[in-house]
Amino acid sequence: MGEFDLIARYFQRPTRAGSGVALGVGDDCALLAPAPGMQLAVSSDMLVEGRHFFADVYPAHLGHKALAVNLSDLAACGAEPLAFTLALALPRVDAVWLQGFADGLLALADAHGCQLVGGDTTQGPLNICITVFGQVPAGRALLRSGTQAGDDIWVSGRTGQARLALDALRGQIHADDALLTRLRQRLERPMPRLALGRRLVGIASSAIDVSDGLLGDLSHILAASRVGARIDVDAATDLLAGGARLASAGLDRGLLMRCALAGGDDYELVFTAAPAERAAVRQAGSDSATRVTRIGSVEAAPGLRLVDGQGQAVRGQFPAFDHFA
Ligand code: ADP
Ligand code: MG
């Protein structure tokens, strides 16, 4: 199968009209048409074998995750997905692999009305680079800057499960089959918080998605907004401990704390909002069927202050994931 047959067979589908896309796969450029009054939100993420995924991961899960991590960036800006491009390097044409990959990728794309409008295909070590395009009301995107002292800090869902899955797959912790299956879902099939993100426009003062670890990604908000924060580490740890039947798994609380605060690969949203918006944040959570939990507050003094449920200082280093550290 040649390059063009491959594209036509797995990645080219008819353009759906009236959905922000004027022209899809097949010409020199795709044409996007955001609605009047909207800004285009654009983000790219690359997945490299051995770095971001194991060589033996299910191709459908890989297709899902490659798009999910990109959609998560749109969610963090409060944007609605329109379209994406796929740049793919493949070692060889493997029909079974390609069909699985395309199925996982396009199922998530369809679930969010996000059309594949173009890309590039080449032979080489497996590498997947996706660029997503979304739209957000002009001037109203959620940014990392924008929070101020006194705001609440919130997190969606639970953080730490993807890291527990990774530790279990590496044999560093024990998880029985039922638990591992649930944790693996979080690692391999993250669900971008798009519905919540869009509802937070006009409510949240800043937001980011958690890819490198809760505290590390929160630090980007603090730096961009030139503020500090106090974080209740018990609240974040309890969220993790309360999920996925972890309570009975006998996992050490220190480990759970490290995973919740610095695990990474969560694709949850961390965001801030004024205390006057608490009811609105909770409503946004329930309207999007997404758990939202208050885990701290923004303070004027720079730096992160970690406290337990009683407000006592907690010492510990929870470094974020860094490819070059
Ligand atoms: P060009 O040489 O002009 O860059 P290509 O020959 O690489 O164009 O691609 C032909 C068409 O197929 C273009 O519309 C391109 O966007 C699309 N395309 C290429 N690879 C992919 C892919 N992996 N997924 C979706 N569309 C693709
Ligand atoms: Mg090309």
Image (tube, helix red, strand yellow):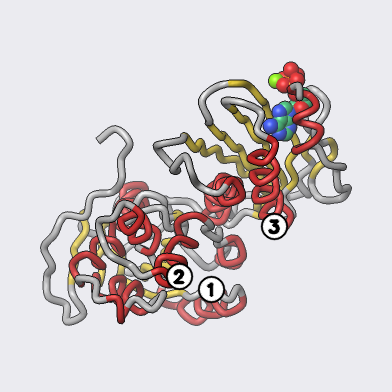
Position of residue 247 measured from the top left corner of the image (x, y, whole percent)? 31, 80
- Residue position for label 1: 290
For the residues bearing labels 2 and 3, Cβ distance under 8 angstroms: no
Give the left or right position of residue 94, taking residue 17 as reference: left
- Residue position for label 3: 112
Position of residue 163 measured from the top left corner of the image (x, y, whole percent)? 34, 57
Q: Please name the amino acid that badge 3 sits on.
A: His
Position of residue 183 measured from the top left corner of the image (x, y, whole percent)? 42, 65
Residue 137 is at least partly visible in this image: no
Judged from the image, the secondary structure of the residue bearing numbered disc 3 is loop
At 21% from the left and 55% from the top, the residue drawn is 318
Does label 1 or label 3 sit earlier along the sequence? 3
How many labels sit on residues?
3
Whether label 1 lies within 8 Å of ligand 1 gets the answer: no
Image quarter (top left, top right, bottom left or bottom right) of the C terminus: top left
Q: Quadrant of ligand 2?
A: top right
Q: CA distance from mark 2 to mark 1?
A: 6 Å
For the residues bearing labels 1 and 3, Cβ distance under 8 angstroms: no
Judged from the image, the secondary structure of the residue bearing numbered disc 2 is loop
> Could you say which is closer to the camera, residue 142 or residue 93?
93
For the residues bearing labels 2 and 1, Cβ distance under 8 angstroms: yes
At 54% from the left and 53% from the top, the residue drawn is 72
- Residue position for label 2: 157
Quarter of the image for residue 310 reads bottom left
Q: Please name the amino acid that badge 2 sits on.
A: Gly
